[in-house]
Image: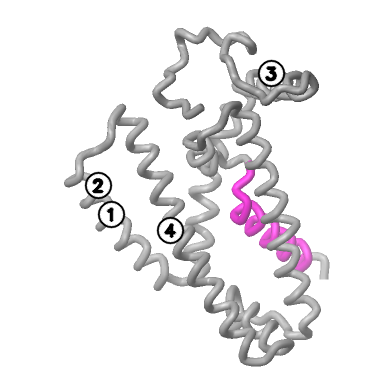
Amino acid sequence: DAQESRGLGDVYKRQGLYANEAGIGSAPNAAANAKSSHPAKIGLVQMLSVFIVTFGICTATSLMTISSGIEATPELAGAPYVQEALYNTFGSFGHIFITAALVFFAFTTVLGNLYYVDSNLTYLKGSKPSQGFMTIYRIIASIVVFVGASAKMSMIWNLSDLFMGIMAIVNVPVILILGKQAIDCLNDYREQIKAGKDPVFRAADIGIDPNKVDLSLIHI
């Protein structure tokens, strides 16, 4: 019915946002540490990653499950539903494939998020935190990962919604504030491409005072 359709729509929107993190402000932590001659290059790569995740991976997963003929039930919520969908088509290989994919996905996700935290701590402190501090932090992080892996799925999704909502509340105003500089940066990149150059970023070209830029945080 209409109410059920709206409920499913809300779930898909939440999970889609969680998958690509567009507008949340988490992925730029890694992009800001990438080495490039122009920040617009990294920005375009980040935009491409959103497209690949949303229209590639998420769409493929949806089509696999919908076309499998397996009915979604509370008992098959999450990964078990995808496993059963592939099992119905590919047999036992479906279970093995999804299990292996989840292991690699979980491992790389944990590594990526820990790298985000390392970058944030270094930025906030102004230097690399001490080894003792990082050891304590990593122990706490490991405990959090273990608790999260064993907690109920509904609680994990609710916590994810809460914290991602908080990040969006902080990040969206920042996007609006820095929007003009981002557009100017993109226009500068396009102009250099049209001129047949390999774009090189100079803060003064888009109206930013180079004396106010912390060059130690820029990798070019």
- The range drawn in magenta is 3-22
Q: CA distance from mark 3 to mark 2?
A: 38 Å
Structural crowding at the residue carrying mark 3, measured as other residues with C-alpha within 10 Å and reported as few (<14), some (14–19) or many (≥20): some
Residue occupied by mark 3 = 184
Quadrant housing residue 72: bottom right
* Residue 140 coordinates in the image, percent (x, y): 27, 56
Residue at 36% over, 31% down:
123
Q: Secondary structure at mark 3?
A: helix
* Residue 103 coordinates in the image, percent (x, y): 48, 72
Assess whether residue 64 is covered by the magenta stretch. no
Q: Earlier in the sequence, mark 3 or mark 2?
A: 2
Residue type at the position of mark 4: Val
Residue at 76% over, 23% down:
196
Q: Secondary structure at mark 1?
A: helix
Residue occupied by mark 4 = 110
Residue occupied by mark 1 = 138
Can you tell which mark lies on residue 134?
Answer: 2
Q: CA distance from mark 1 to mark 2?
A: 6 Å
Q: CA distance from mark 4 to mark 1?
A: 11 Å
Mark 4 and mark 3 residues within 8 Å of each other at the beta carbon:
no
Mark 1 and mark 2 residues within 8 Å of each other at the beta carbon:
yes
Q: Secondary structure at mark 4?
A: helix
Structural crowding at the residue carrying mark 4, measured as other residues with C-alpha within 10 Å and reported as few (<14), some (14–19) or many (≥20): some
| Type of secondary structure dominating the magenta stretch | helix
Residue type at the position of mark 3: Asp
